[in-house]
Image: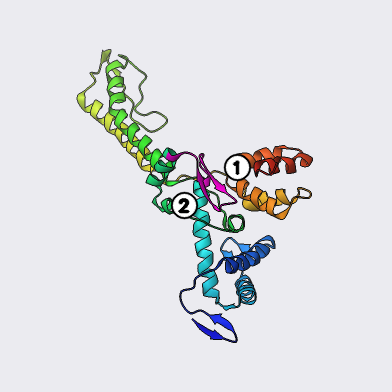
Amino acid sequence: MSASNGKKRYRGYLTWTDDMDQALLDTLVEHYNNGNRTPTGWKPHVYNEAVKNVREKCNVDITKDHVMSRCKTFDKHCNVLGRILAHDGFEWDQEKNRLVIHNEDAWNRYVEKNKAAACYQHKVIKNWDAISLIFSRDHAATSEDVSTGAENGQEMARKVPEDVHEVTANSPSTSAPSSQDHGGRPVLTQQIQQGRRKKFRTNDALFCMSGEIKNSFQISIRSNEPLEESKSSSPKEIFAVLQEIPNLARDDLLRAYCILTSNDRKFEALVALPLDMRKDWLLMEIGKK
C-alpha cells in the first residue's frame, strides 16, 4: 500500500471495510435497477462507476480488479446462503446480519451434504439485502436433493431382481404372442405352437432379468445427473411486482425481495392478494407489523 494525493493506494490484496462495501453496493444496486446487469455480467461502464464511487467516498485508490474480486465474494455468499435459506428451519436475522438455525439436526444433515455451508453458521455478512438483490439466483436443486435421488435409484435397482422373480413364478401359462412391450423391455411370453406349449427356459428368464437390470441401472445413472431447476419466478419479475406496491419503503422492499426470491410459495401468495393488501402482508412477513 502506498499514498498518492492523500489517497490510500492498494496493490494486490485489499481488505474491504464496511464503508467501502456500502459504497460499492450502492452503485451496483442503482445500475441493477437500471438494467445494466446482463446474463453474462455487468456492463463495462458499471465497474468504472463503482471504482469512482468507492474512491470518492472512502478516499482509497482501488482498481477494477478489486471490484471484480469483491463481486465474486458477494456472489459466493449469495449462492451458498441462498441455497441454505431455501430450506425449512433456517432464516436470516436482519439485525444481527447472520444465519439463524432453528433445527440443529437439519443443519447437521445439510452441512454433511454441503461442506461449503459449514463456515456460514456464525459468519456475519452485512448488507445482505443489497447482496441478495443483485446476486440472487434460483436454487431449485441442491447436492442433498441429488444425493437423495441417487439413493432412491439404487434402491430400485436392488429391488428389481426380486420383482422379476415374482413375475417368472406367477406368470400365466399362456399369453398373447409378443416379444416386447411399449417400453422396449423383453416380456415373459409362452407361445403356442402346433397345439403344444413351449416350455419357459432358464435362458429366457436370464434374458428377461438382464433387461430389467439394465433399465434399473439406467434409472440409477439418471438419478445422479443434476436435477432440472423448476420454473420459478425470476428476480426481475419479483422486483417489478414489489415496485407496484404504493408507499413501500426502500428498506422494506429489499427485505421483502430477499424473502420472496428464496421462497416461490410466498411470492405466489403475494400475487394472489389484491394490490391494496400487499403492503400490509409484506410488513407482517418482514416482522414490522
Q: Can the viewer see residue 190 in this picture?
A: no
Query: Label 2 amino acid?
Result: His
Viewer-side residue, 202 vs 219: 219
Span colored in magenta: 85-104
Q: Tell me which corner region of the image, top left, top right, bottom left or bottom right, holds residue 220.
A: top left
Residue 184, x across and y down, in percent: 38, 33
Q: Is residue 269 left or right of residue 93?
A: right
Q: Relative to 270, does residue 156 appear above or below in the rendering?
A: above
Question: Is mark 2 in CB contact (under 8 Å) with mark 1?
Answer: no
Mark 2 highlights which residue? Answer: 122
Query: Label 1 amino acid?
Result: Asp
| Residue 115: mark in rendering | none
Residue at 66 percent of width and 65 percent of height: 31
Number of marks drawn: 2
Q: CA distance from mark 2 to mark 1?
A: 26 Å
Viewer-side residue, 22 vs 81: 22
Q: Relative to 53, does residue 123 appear above or below in the rendering?
A: above
